[in-house]
Image (cartoon, coloured by chain):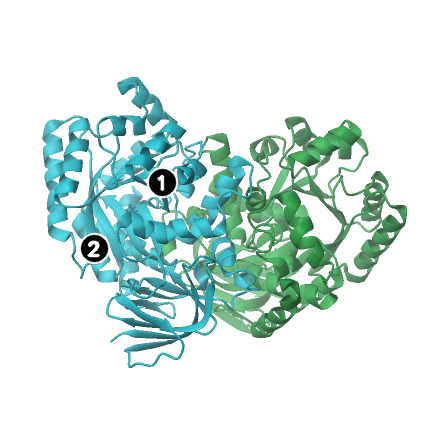
Chain colours: A green, B cyan
Amino acid sequence: MGILIKEVDVLTQNRNRDVLRGVDILIQGKRIEKIGRNIKGKTEFKIDGRGKLAVPGLINTHTHVAMTLFRGYADDMRFWEAWPERIWPREKKVKAEDVRAGSLLGCLEMIRSGTTCFMDNYFFMDEVAEAVKGVGMRANLAYGMIDIGDAEKRKKELKIGEEFVKDFDGKADGRIGCSFAPHAPYSCSEELLLKAKELAEKHDALLQIHVAETRKEVFDSLKKSGKRPVEYLESIGFLSKRVIAAHCVWITKREVGMLGSKGAKVSYNPVSNMKLASGGVAPIPQMLESDVCVTFGTDGAVSNNSLNMLETIKVGTLLQKSHLWDSRVLNAQQALDFATINGAKALGIEAGSVEEGKLADMFLMELNSPNLLPANSLVSNLVYSSNPSNISDVIVDGKLVMKDRKILTIDEEKVFEKIRKVSEKFRE
Amino acid sequence: MGILIKEVDVLTQNRNRDVLRGVDILIQGKRIEKIGRNIKGKTEFKIDGRGKLAVPGLINTHTHVAMTLFRGYADDMRFWEAWPERIWPREKKVKAEDVRAGSLLGCLEMIRSGTTCFMDNYFFMDEVAEAVKGVGMRANLAYGMIDIGDAEKRKKELKIGEEFVKDFDGKADGRIGCSFAPHAPYSCSEELLLKAKELAEKHDALLQIHVAETRKEVFDSLKKSGKRPVEYLESIGFLSKRVIAAHCVWITKREVGMLGSKGAKVSYNPVSNMKLASGGVAPIPQMLESDVCVTFGTDGAVSNNSLNMLETIKVGTLLQKSHLWDSRVLNAQQALDFATINGAKALGIEAGSVEEGKLADMFLMELNSPNLLPANSLVSNLVYSSNPSNISDVIVDGKLVMKDRKILTIDEEKVFEKIRKVSEKFRE
């Protein structure tokens, strides 16, 4: 058992963020047991790490992975036309097996682009969990709840949400965590939001929610309650350390302060926000000033359309620089931290860095690639010039999920076949 | 001789932009001889195209390829501090062999990301040309001229610029075209600009120039001449069909009209403009209204930092949508056209589409990849969710440059070795 990576370069978390050159990494069980020189040991896998960089596995804190099924169906349209016209009618046709297939496909895409862990909310979540289990990733999952003020629906939604948590929290050898996901302040009643919070406390779970993604949402919120979305969530006592708020595009400095003081985390989804023309830009520098833990999400494949976190990291920095007319804003290391150590903090997992004692979630990047040379700055190259073609190996929870670009956990071709089959019925 | 690709999918240029499914492509000499069913013929290479998409080679209309040497040296800094502090001192140390190495490296990066042709201006251009020749790409190259009002320098620059054109135009079996590149309206005197224009006419060559990249440039131009950069170029008679104007971020609708009526082309460089926080956004919809031929450029590796046109295409659409709060602006097909057929038009080459009679410049994309399934829309997947890991084969000028991810024209490892060696001296 175990994995020994020989003579690999490693990004560290020390003060200067030094790179360790040509060290060995010994992985035993789920964890990184030792990082050092000349480590010997009998392990199941031995990887030649020369010319490679060990990078903490990327953590995608907001997606709807099964929506790969609808990739490309709602491009270049108005947000408020795209979903009702192109997505909701198709979602009505979705069966459990489709969600399984779409989730497996999305997981494969994420693994191949260096993501080892993701947070997700959708429906048929048992299927998403089974996909995660089979493919060997780590994930925090929730059933997405909506009541639109309907008490009957609310009861049903909460029941499904809680049963999912009971059934799957801690499953897959601890790789699956569960959370509660009231969809958004505009689609959920105050009762649903508060009941979800109560359940999250009862099960010691996180809360996922979409917040302030569009201007319309802010306008509607002000009209309805006289409060902006985050102000409203604050006023009803919803905000806490358990909350991962996705998007937060249209929030004021005061709302940023509320998120910060309550310890709520933010999932910044730059590619989705740009593609859907949410307008405005999440105020990341203000969030950092208010000590908000910022993380990155890709959002689903309808909104992005890739699940490529390397792209999200780069675009996330570019968008801030461009929007604020300041190229110094959000540097490469900060952006990488959002996708690694901050993601781990937000999801409450002991990962996000390649350090002794941490969970062994990482990927190896081939440094001898034309887009990663010269190696003037490895962090700069990783953030600003890498792409999934550079990723050779992925390890999750101490197990090799991809070795030399080959997925070891499941038969990739079978997933492709299944997707071709199930996607037929969504072609209209 | 020749290449026969069997049963491949092909993006067409017909009115509906249909995709041909499972056709054969016969390439003889430099050109696509035939596209159809059951083509037989004896060719040097036979490629199994099943599960692959033939895409016109991407055309990068603005870069400084040798600047890969300095990748990552000027991140997250102010534009006007980055170059004087980090780049110019290093450029003083640059020798001919460094430019050769940096150019080969950049060419390899471009090939691996689907680019078959690029437009470049820098110095030691003989070395760039030799790199292009060796690696098997197509390029339009120019020596970048600056005089800052110095008549002696002007004379010298024009001499180098013209000699380069005389020596290399039409070389490498016609793969190399040459142009004249007065750097920018602010770094070149009126005399240099007009003399460059005259030489371009004499040699029937194109003109490359940086235009309106920053606000400061517009401010300085107004102060100096009372005219904005494009207005100034128009007033001295510089604009014509020969001009490829890079950036054009800070231009008015009136200036867009001037570019359009003179037939000047634009190279839109969204990633560079965002990373350097040029602020503002090139007014692409106005350009389209004024019939300006818009193309895509990556800019050099100091400004981007990758030379990945697939990324540029996606970011280029996202930036327009986000900036204009309208997700309908610049759709996937339009963006792809910028990078293919428009690039070919701008550079005056018979490429940019996979059609009978055209130059055989194309790449093959593996459709059985998790990020390219389901195949709901091939154009959408190519623009919004592909990445270089999907590219298996690249053909330029009828020759296989990359086959099954292996570069056939040069020894890639030797380029990496050379780069590691020459880049040492730039580490300070």
- Dividing the picture into quadrants, the one containing residue A225 is top right
The residue at 22%/58% (across/down) is: B175
Which secondary structure, mark 2?
strand
Q: Amino acid at mark 1?
A: Val
Left or right, B426 with respect to A263, comes to left
Secondary element at tag 1: loop
Instruction: State whether residue B6 is above or below residue A342.
Output: below
Label 1, label 2: how far apart the Cα atoms are: 25 Å
User: Which quadrant: the C terminus of chain A?
Assistant: bottom right
Q: Chain of mark 1?
A: B
Comparing A147 with A109, the one in front is A147
Which residue is the site of mark 1?
Answer: B292
Residue at numbered disc 2: B176
Which of the 4 image quadrants contains residue B221?
A: top left
Circle on res. A267: none
Residue B76 appears in the rendering: no
Disc on the earlier residue, 1 or 2? 2
Q: Amino acid at mark 2?
A: Ile
Is B365 rendered above or below residue A319?
Answer: below
